[in-house]
Amino acid sequence: MRTASGSLVPLGAFARVDRTAGALTVNQLGQLPAVTISYNLPQGVALGDSVTRINALKEQIGMPTVISTTFAGTAKTFQDSLANQGFLVGGAILTIYIVLGILYESFIHPLTILTGLPSAVLGAVVALRFAGMDLSVIAVIGILMLIGIVKKNGIMMVDVALELRRDGMSATESIHKACLMRFRPIMMTTLAALMGTFPIALGTGASAELRQPLGVAVVGGLLASQALTLFVTPVIYVYMENFSGWLVGLWSKRKGETGPVEAGDQPSLFKPREDMLPEPQQAAAE
């Protein structure tokens, strides 16, 4: 080898050469020597469970600090998808809120319709835990499906209640009558969705373990939301109507209008007050 001064020094002066068995190739990851350990999942074990077990075994072994570990392949994709699931759920809820706000021309009642989502998500998580499944990517897809399925109960009730409000009914009377009118359609659509996803939750057929978390999440979310939506959504609707009337009364005071506003006669934000509408123009008589 050539030194800094330019002279040549034989390799045997500072090293020893021996013949031994070694690796044909040396893999590197981040400019460091790396060893890849592959494994196959046994039947009935989810990918998320295997990742959790490997992390637990790594803590039990007590590996030196100079050795670092990381997942690659499908396991890394699984971890990345779980890290972004909050953004996916939040984006889905925001999109539905914007669409409902445009359809109803209101900022208030889309929130009333979305009040059934927490119970659905809670029911999905409880069902997954009860079945011994983790919150995998397939289960998250089931929760995203629930966001689109569960809101139909709120739409059926709120839409009829708003129509009855236009006819002069109070908030309490309108939502009560809407629940009575829409009880059968709500039960029919929910039972149809349950019957469609129940075979998936049972896990029958080829590759059933891949689809089963989706069915369990949807079935658990539908059962929980159906049990609570008919009680929670009407209460939220009444409070939202009162809040909407309070905002309209506050806006009227700022505009300099006088006179108390009755709670039962407060208009919703989507409905303009009659005294704010332009007066019809009279046709000129010839």
Image (tube, rainbow, N blue to C red):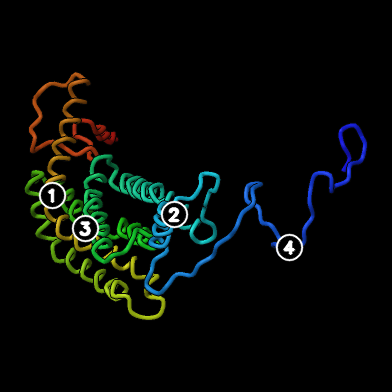
Q: Residue 98 falls in which quadrant of the image?
A: top left
* Location of residue 259 in the rendering, given as x and y in whole percent from the top left corner: 9, 23
Measure the C-alpha gap from mark 2 to mark 4. Answer: 29 Å
Camera-near label (1 vs 2) is 2
Query: Looking at the rendering, in which quadrant would you find the C terminus?
Result: top left
- Label 2 crowding class (10 Å Cα cut-off): few <14, some 14-19, many 20+? few
| Rendered residue at 12%/56% (across/down) | 179
Q: Nearer the viewer, residue 56 or 164?
A: 56
**Residue displayed at 92% across by 35% down:** 6
Q: Residue at x 11, y 50 (%)?
A: 175
- Identify residue type, mark 2: Ile
* Local secondary structure at mark 4: loop
The residue under label 1 is 234
Give the amino acid type for the residue marked by disc 3 in the picture.
Asn
Q: Which quadrant is the N terminus positioned in? A: top right
Q: CA–CA distance between discs 1 and 2?
A: 55 Å
In the picture, the disc for residue 214 is none
Question: x, y percentage for residue 75?
Answer: 48, 59
Residue occupied by mark 3: 153
Instruction: Give yes or no for contact between labels 3 and 4 (Cβ–Cβ under 8 Å).
Output: no
Q: Is residue 61 above or below residue 1?
A: below
Q: Could you tell whether 47 is left or right of 192 in the image? A: right
**Marks 2 and 4, the one that precedes in the sequence:** 4
Q: Are the two marked residues, 1 and 2, in contact with CB atoms closer than 8 angstroms?
A: no
Return the disc, 4 or 1, that comes first in the chain's sequence.
4
Residue that label 2 marks: 61
- The amino acid sitting under disc 1 is Pro
Sequence order check: which comes first, mark 3 or mark 4? 4
**Sequence-earlier tag: 1 or 2:** 2
SS type, badge 3: helix
Name the residue carrying label 4. 20
**CA gap, disc 2 and disc 3:** 52 Å
